[in-house]
Amino acid sequence: MVVLKVFFPSCCSSAESGLLVGHWIPEQNSAVILAVVHFPFIPVQVKQYLSEVRQVTQVNVSVLGTWSNCKKKEESLSEFLEDLGTIFSHEPWIQLCKETDSKFWSCSIIQKHPSTPKEDEIILVYYDQRKVMLSHLHPPGNLTNSTDHKAEDASKLAILFDTVAKSKVLFMKDRYDDGPIKLTHWQSEGVEASIIVELMKQASIPVCMLLTFLLSFVSSVCKSRVLKFWPLCFIWSKLSTCEQLGHRLEHLQVISSNRKAQNQPQLMRKANIFVSLLADVALGILLMSWLYRKNRIGHLADTLIPVADHVAKELQDLLQWLMGVPAGLKMNRALDQVLGRFFLYHIHLWISYIHLMSPFIEMILWYVGLSACLGLTVALSILSDIIALLTFHIYCFYVYGARLYCLKIYGLSSLWRLFRGKKWNVLRQRVDSCSYDLDQLFIGTLLFTILLFLLPTTALYYLVFTLLRLLVVVVQGLIHLLVDLIDSLPLYSILLRLCRSYRLAAGVKFRVLEQKTGKPLRLLMQINPLSYGSVVQTYRLPTYSCYPKDSWGSLCKKLFLGELIYPWKHKGEKQD
């Protein structure tokens, strides 16, 4: 028994009698009906029109059979429909008939040259032509881990969706056209909207040309040799604001490009970037309006100096605590006093710097607030840079403590190898055996003892300032995560999934409409949309990646050894 599947558009169920035009898929024994040609018609004109459609769409569109929508049984019409099989001669010839006195449809298959006498089982599948044409079928998440049966079903559905999508030219012919050929198919009735869209396209051409010229000029300035000299290159590589501006400049170049998207992923990427930019600018304007309302910038500038003084006082109290007997620990008195006074002097310099800049802080914040019109991500990047500048003294404390602690750790490890008669071979990057004389062992023992007894004092300062540094890094990391979320979130795809879920299809499901012995099984094909998680994963926009490049084990190792931590630097980049 051979199962023959006929995919019939639901919009043609009320069409007048005529010819079934579609595409035959022999490997699946399936027929995809695309339109119905009404009576009366001239067969020569129908063949000529279908040949033109085949040249444009590259789809083998042909007459697959006849469609009869009879209010009452007419023998003359049924005989005429049977005779059309000799004119168009398609193998097999499908005859669909809908009768008003019964809710079931009759379908018969005529084969002129049957190889073996066999009984065909017919499955009639209804599909929404508009949804199938506009949707993009996404394959399963990982076909390599899926079964072969699922992969085969996905390929069969892809042929169906691709056939309907390529036959878009066929649907452009108006169903109400008074020409020699009248078709019934899905036809958009938004003529006024189409005119508005075309006018917007024509108006956007000069705007895009002007924007492309300005962006190319800005890009050429950014790539010039002027920015490669110090300190401009240093500032451009260190500030998050410069990285975000460069990232948004690339997005603007993608949007304003006059190069047409070649496929659906490129089109979705452009749309996602455009909507992301609009949302970013809108949020930035809302933030700017909130800042300039009720003189909030002035209040913020007035509270900044007292907050800085309070932070400095807390740091001074912390250092005074460390210079005493912290938590009852016995510290090296001389080293403790030297380190404490050294860090207290840095706090004094930092407070003097803040008070020197206090008359200009309100003006600086006023101009920073204006930058929010470029987008919320730019404002957040500026906030991250301001936090980095305001906590620069904490960064200096961390660097001093980490370098001193790291020096002692590596010194102790080298002297420990000396006791065991080992040494580190720099050329071969391994530990080799070595013989030491008595003087070398004595000096090594003396240095090992000194470093070992000074290690608790250094380790305590390193621990305290590392925790402060990690607190600042966590705050900056949360800001960078928010910037990365705004940059990479595919808002257009999410809105498309929310409003028109059929545009992002993950597959189909079938629902049984009617089933009766001797009649074809009638199914309704419905589109299964992608889940929101799959939409975000599939269409997520690339960013400059603010996530840590090292694993948790590597970070813990660096913290233990006293190596400097730069969470947002690549492993291959040079660390200052």
Image (tube, rainbow, N blue to C red):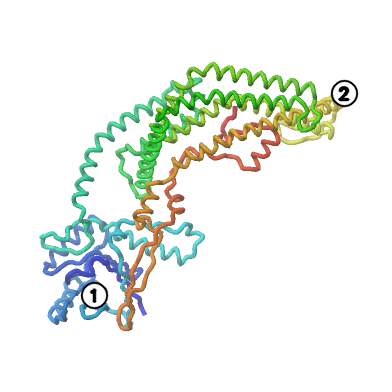
The structure residue drawn at horizontal position 20% and vertical position 78%, both measured from the top left corner, is 100
The structure residue drawn at horizontal position 49% and vertical position 65%, both measured from the top left corner, is 147
Which of the pair 534/163 is nearer the observer?
A: 534
Task: Work out whether residue 215 can be spotted.
Answer: yes
Measured along the vertical axis of the image, is residue 414 above or below residue 40? above
Measured along the vertical axis of the image, is residue 59 above or below residue 67? above
Query: Residue 214, position in %: x, y?
Result: 32, 29
- Residue count near mark 2 (Cα–Cα under 10 Å), binned few <14, some 14–19, many ≥20: few
**Residue at mark 1:** 96
The structure residue drawn at horizontal position 48% and vertical position 18%, both measured from the top left corner, is 360
Mark 1 / mark 2, whichever is N-terminal: 1
Amino acid type shown at disc 1: Leu
Query: Residue 469, position in %: x, y?
Result: 62, 32
Distance between mark 1 and mark 2 Cα atoms: 106 Å
Amino acid type shown at disc 2: Asp
Q: Quadrant of the C terminus?
A: top right
The structure residue drawn at horizontal position 31% and vertical position 78%, both measured from the top left corner, is 520
| Secondary element at tag 2 | helix
Query: Residue 375, position in %: x, y?
Result: 40, 34
**Residue at mark 2:** 439
| Secondary element at tag 1 | strand
Which of the pair 280/273 is nearer the observer?
A: 280
